[in-house]
Amino acid sequence: MAKVLQGVKQTYISEFTAQTLLNSLSYCVWLSDKDSRIIFTNLAFGEYLGINSDTRPILSSIVHSDDLEEIRRMLYDEKRTYNLNRIIARVRRFDGVYRWCYICSYPLYGPENLLYGYLGTLTDISNAMSNFNLDEMMSEFFDSKYENVPFGLLVIDQDDQIIFCNDMCETITSRSKEQLLYKNWKLFDYSNNSTELACNLEKIKSGEKERINSLLKLMKPDQSEVWITVTVFSLKENGTDSGKYMFVINDITENIHLAEQTSAQERFLSLFWSDRPGMIFRCQPGPEASMSYVSEGCFQLTGYDQRFLTTNKRFYFNKVINKEYRQYLYQRRNEAIQENRIHKDEYMITTSAGEQRWVFEQLQGIYDASGQLVVVEGLVSDITESKEKDYEILKMQYHDPVTGINNRRFFEASCRNLDRIDRLPVTVVVVKVSGLRLVKEALGQSVRDELMVSVSQIITRCCKDKDVVAVTGEDEFTVLLPESDYDQACNLIQQIRMQMKVSKDKIYSKTGLITGFFGCATKKNKHELLCDVVHQAEKNLYFPCEGEQKHHAAFPNIYSSQRFMRRQISERSARVHKLCHYLGLRFNLDEDEMNRLKMLSMVHNIGLAEVSSNILLKQGKLTRDEWAVIKMHPEIGYRIALASAELACVAEEILYHHEWWNGAGYPKGLKGEEIPFLSRILAVADAYDAMTNERPYRFALSKEKAIEEIKMYAGIRFDHSVVRMFLHVIQEEGLD
């Protein structure tokens, strides 16, 4: 497999990445060795033919016996010409049914022009092929019912002269019957296949074959191309050969164009036809390719003046071409010129400014009347922008837009590919970043994205080049470690944990909200599927198997976050916490309730972090609209708390800490014991602290005045029992 891939010139991707990309394509792609044994099929090919990853058939074994000669001819022609070749053939699917397919194949050559194998694509064109009864047509052809059939029919005699054609032939060829009749059928073929078809036709004439199929290209009078399939058979009269031969013709031009849009090789060749500025040239044959004429586009393309290339005897255009392409291009050009055909290729050049550019070249030889080569003419066009766009499209398909690393699509394709090849053991590491939803709710999407980028960079730095790192969820990364066992994965986890702890990234120090959880699992035999191993690694985040440790990286505690407790919120929360602590002790709350009360007292105003400072710091009375914004903070805090595993246990208490005992509070208008008990405790402590401390819009009340206010609102705003306990705490603990 690796050796065959070397035949793709200048492939700057690894074998693993190449297989991953091929598997992501929606059309059928295959690779075979030089003996036509299939050594790789992408997933689309396997699904179409029903071939699993362990099956490696010879190409000819899946082709109808009547079409084997076409396959052999295609491969033979490729060896001689280095050209892309096209044929039609019937291919057997998993259900045993043969389907008509359009097959493109291209030879892959390595160093010293050694043939390594073939790259091909396959497209189903059965819907374009006419469904006719051959036996019936051979015996009843002259029945008038065939005059108006939806496919072309023509008959030739022993001398290859057309002696009959129906109306559809006129439509397909854009020629009248008068223009077709009594002409040699070979005059209309421009696909270089007429010689092969003529050889096969001789076998029908001799009785060696009953019928043949071929793919031809016709040229209409307006110079447009028509691709047709041709089925040829001998006509019988009274059971014996009549000396006449039927051509059944189907126009499949539309199918060919559709197939070429999805064929990697056809897309490669079609770049020339884009409307790009280029350089027209005329040069002498030879390795230097000295120019006798260069168009003005030369300067825009290469940075060299056109006269420099035509008058400087020591500098040739070939020197602009990157060295690794020169010998390869020289051989390909010579072969095309010797065979009197057009040469097309892509390569890289270095401009006068040292810039690297991709170009597409098309050239052909110009011959005199005696057939001697005179000059070579061609066009070189800049395709760098197209190459970059192709790369960007590929990047968008397989990369996460926030972090720039691989996304889930690439990750899943990598898993399928690793399931097909032997790189055991393969270990999966899942990194769950807890707290990102909380960051998004409280600090915004941009801060959340910064954190994702920072974590992705840490993970990537700790991994090797062969490892696959991907974003697989809103707060999840997954790493594939080919040829790595569980111990190596644990070492990686330890490295990531240490990098997170020692990170000087200001995002961590300012938020302190992130906790990383790690889980891993290992694929040890080829029968396991990586998708199952990934699920096991995800389970190990919370339910590690025996002998497996759950790893976590604890960042600074959430309650120390100055970003949440900005504008003195954290200082006020500390005072409220102290008062709540004494009240909790008075009510003999158990340890769990005391912990929840402590957390509630520290984060109950977390929703104020999303309120504008223009409102929070306003000097003077709030307007109705501004007060409506303030009253939203319990619901904002509730959503933030639900987004955090650490705060979810007090989310309801945060939502209801501004409810009144008589039902006049907000946001839900709960009353009495409908209000959570911890919220009732907090309401008293929070109100006392608010009254005894200065606000931007008023001075602080005295301790005595604040206590009188609390007493006055007992049974109205506050729970009687909480107020009584509050008065004991103030009196006995001496709190200010």
Image (cartoon, grey):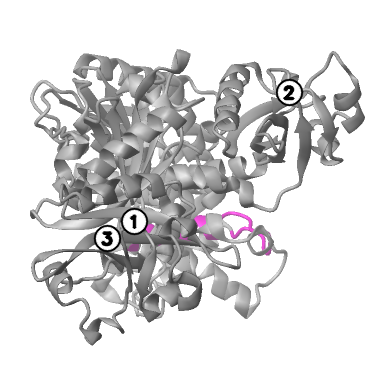
Q: Nearer the viewer, mark 3 or mark 1?
A: 3
Question: Of the numbered discs in the image, which one, if any, rests on residue 642?
Answer: 1
- Residue 140 in the image: x percent, y percent? 16, 77
* Sequence-first tag of 1 and 2: 2
Q: Can residue 565 be seen in this view?
A: no
- Residue 296 in the image: x percent, y percent? 87, 40
What residue lies at 82% left-to-right and 36% top-to-bottom?
Answer: 298
Instruction: Indicate the quadrant where residue 665 lies.
Output: bottom left
Specify the segment rendered in magenta.
Answer: 679-701
Amino acid type indicated by mark 3 = Thr
What residue lies at 23% left-to-right and 49% top-to-bottom?
Answer: 593
What residue lies at 25% left-to-right and 30% top-to-bottom?
Answer: 36
**Residue position for label 2:** 289
How far apart marks 3 and 2 lie (CA) works out to 45 Å
For the residue pair 48 and 158, the one nearer the viewer reads as 158
Are the two marked residues, 3 and 2, in contact with CB atoms closer than 8 angstroms?
Answer: no
What residue lies at 45% left-to-right and 47% top-to-bottom?
Answer: 397
Which quadrant: the N terminus? top left
